[in-house]
Image: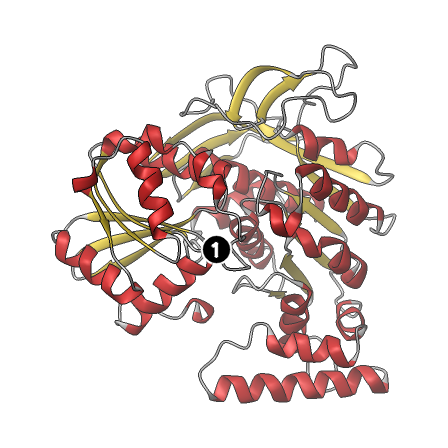
């Protein structure tokens, strides 16, 4: 049984959760906040009782998809994990997931945990749950007002790695130099993943890079191949820092509108089919497979689980509405936008957009990042764009400067009106791409749910 204070915190959190669920709310955050306010150690006590331990997935882009893939992988291998599946990824979201899974006396029903964790919370959560595996997907400039500069985020990741138990494993993206460096002074085991295919490079010109100089000695990096931003095949001519050969590698990579396929190199040989388009989803799958490898799960098992993967809300999720298909894509920084744009441009035909820009705390107050995103590459393919959100005028101006004619841009205030305008402007059989920041995605998803086209995101 839990210590008395932790038990009181657990009961209070469970009562909070029950009250919220009675009102039809998701209860993915507030119960955890209540629990941690009463006893900051309650989540640690519950997590310590999980026999298979905890896996934490963090990074700028891809952590929701990667953690969901990994949850599917471990389930197929026989685990019964607790998972913050709804995406509440601060410490309170992790605590809420543990509270929901535990019995009233604090015994977990799950045998392990997969947690997606926000970059700003990674040190706190790592110290709280003591993960046996920490996965870092990538690091890009994102929400400078929340996270600070890239070096600051990387320092947090190093601090989180330093807080791991000695027997823990780090899973790192070999193709991201700043992520790769995190493994340099780590005393435990490190497994790296990456793309070993010389034909894979960025579909868009990589005009903006968040890291141009060696993170070790600050000399200018040289690239033989760039996939996205600063991710690729790099080397430093000054100190010798270079992309290592990854233990889990993708070869023969192919991607189209139906999904992404690759063959695992480094002796694995398993063929992997990811039912999501975009090379960045190959990285997400590789991260999940590498984490599975750290847990002793065969690559063939991981590939089988990933082959039947369903996307999270806003991560290339498809919503049917009056014969139209709305594909929701969360975009929150230049690298993420460019990856999404490259996927859109890989398809044949024109692009119909519903795009939304917010500047609430969860989005980041500074929206200047849209001027570093490559709208210019996308603009010639846009048939029309419906623009909404709290900063819709900024976004419409950005589209204008990208070369989209004003008579193809329609600014619509209000979420309901924007969705209705898209349905009126399109025809049955059309696909509409919805590019939106985090809180805008939530608002549009809530609108689609209220209209009867989708479930609430936390019900998935």
Foreground of the two, 33 or 388: 388
The residue depicted at 44 percent of the width and 40 percent of the height is 370
Query: Secondary structure beneath disc 1?
Result: loop
Q: Is residue 31 above or below residue 404?
A: below
Q: Is residue 107 visible?
A: no
> Looking at the rendering, which quadrant does residue 215 occupy?
top right
Q: Residue at x 71, y 15 (%)?
A: 236
Image vertical order of residue 251 relative to residue 292, above or below: above
Residue 421 as seen in the image, left or right of residue 281:
left
| Camera-nearest residue between 81 and 8 | 8
Way the structure is coloured: secondary structure
Is 451 positioned to the left or the right of 42 in the image? left
Position of residue 454 in the picture relative to residue 2 (left or right): left
> Residue 87, how many percent across, how many down?
54, 61
Q: Residue at x 66, y 75 (%)?
A: 32
User: On screen, 292 above or below 107?
Assistant: above
Front residue of this view, candidates 355 and 284: 355
Quadrant (top left/top right/bottom left/bottom right) for the N terminus? bottom right
Task: State the image coordinates of residue 418 (x, y, percent, origin top left).
Answer: 25, 59
């Amino acid at each position: 049984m839990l210590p008395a204070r932790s038990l009181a915190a657990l009961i209070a959190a469970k009562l909070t959760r029950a009250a919220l669920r009675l009102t039809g709310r998701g209860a993915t955050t507030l119960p955890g906040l209540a629990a941690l306010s009463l006893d900051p150690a309650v989540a640690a006590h519950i997590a310590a009782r999980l026999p298979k331990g905890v896996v934490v997935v963090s990074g700028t882009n891809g952590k929701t998809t990667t953690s969901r893939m990994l949850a599917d992988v471990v389930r197929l291998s026989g685990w019964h994990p607790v998972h913050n599946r709804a995406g509440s990824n601060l410490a309170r979201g992790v605590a809420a997931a543990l509270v929901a899974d535990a019995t009233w006396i604090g015994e977990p029903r799950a045998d392990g945990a997969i947690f997606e964790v926000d970059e700003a919370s990674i040190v706190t959560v790592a110290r709280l749950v003591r993960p046996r595996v920490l996965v870092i997907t990538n690091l890009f400039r994102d929400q400078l007002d929340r996270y600070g500069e890239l070096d600051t985020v990387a320092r947090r990741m190093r601090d989180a790695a330093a807080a791991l138990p000695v027997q823990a494993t780090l899973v790192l993206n070999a193709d991201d130099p700043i992520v790769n460096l995190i493994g340099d002074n780590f005393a435990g085991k490190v497994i790296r993943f990456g793309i070993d295919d010389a034909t894979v490079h960025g579909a868009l010109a990589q005009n903006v890079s968040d890291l141009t100089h060696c993170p070790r000695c600050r000399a200018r990096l040289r690239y033989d191949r760039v996939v996205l931003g600063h991710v690729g095949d790099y080397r430093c001519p000054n100190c010798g820092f270079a992309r290592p050969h990854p233990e889990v590698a993708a070869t023969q990579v192919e991607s189209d509108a139906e999904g992404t396929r690759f063959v695992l190199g480094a002796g694995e040989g398993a063929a992997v089919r990811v039912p999501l388009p975009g090379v960045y989803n190959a990285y997400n799958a590789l991260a999940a497979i590498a984490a599975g490898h750290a847990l002793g799960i065969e690559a063939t098992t991981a590939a089988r689980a990933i082959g039947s993967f369903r996307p999270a809300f806003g991560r290339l999720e498809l919503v049917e509405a009056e014969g139209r298909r709305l594909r929701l894509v969360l975009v929150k920084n230049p690298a993420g936008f460019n990856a999404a744009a490259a996927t859109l441009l890989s398809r044949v035909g024109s692009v119909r957009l519903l795009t939304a820009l917010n500047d609430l705390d969860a989005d980041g107050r500074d929206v200047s990042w849209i001027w570093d995103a490559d709208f210019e590459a996308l603009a010639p393919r846009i048939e029309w764009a419906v623009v909404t959100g709290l900063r819709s005028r900024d976004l419409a101006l950005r589209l204008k400067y990208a070369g989209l004619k004003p008579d193809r841009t329609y600014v619509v205030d209000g979420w309901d009106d924007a969705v209705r305008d898209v349905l009126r402007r399109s025809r049955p059989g059309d696909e509409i791409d919805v590019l939106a920041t985090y809180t805008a995605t939530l608002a549009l998803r809530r609108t689609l749910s209220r209209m009867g086209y989708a479930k609430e995101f936390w019900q998935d």
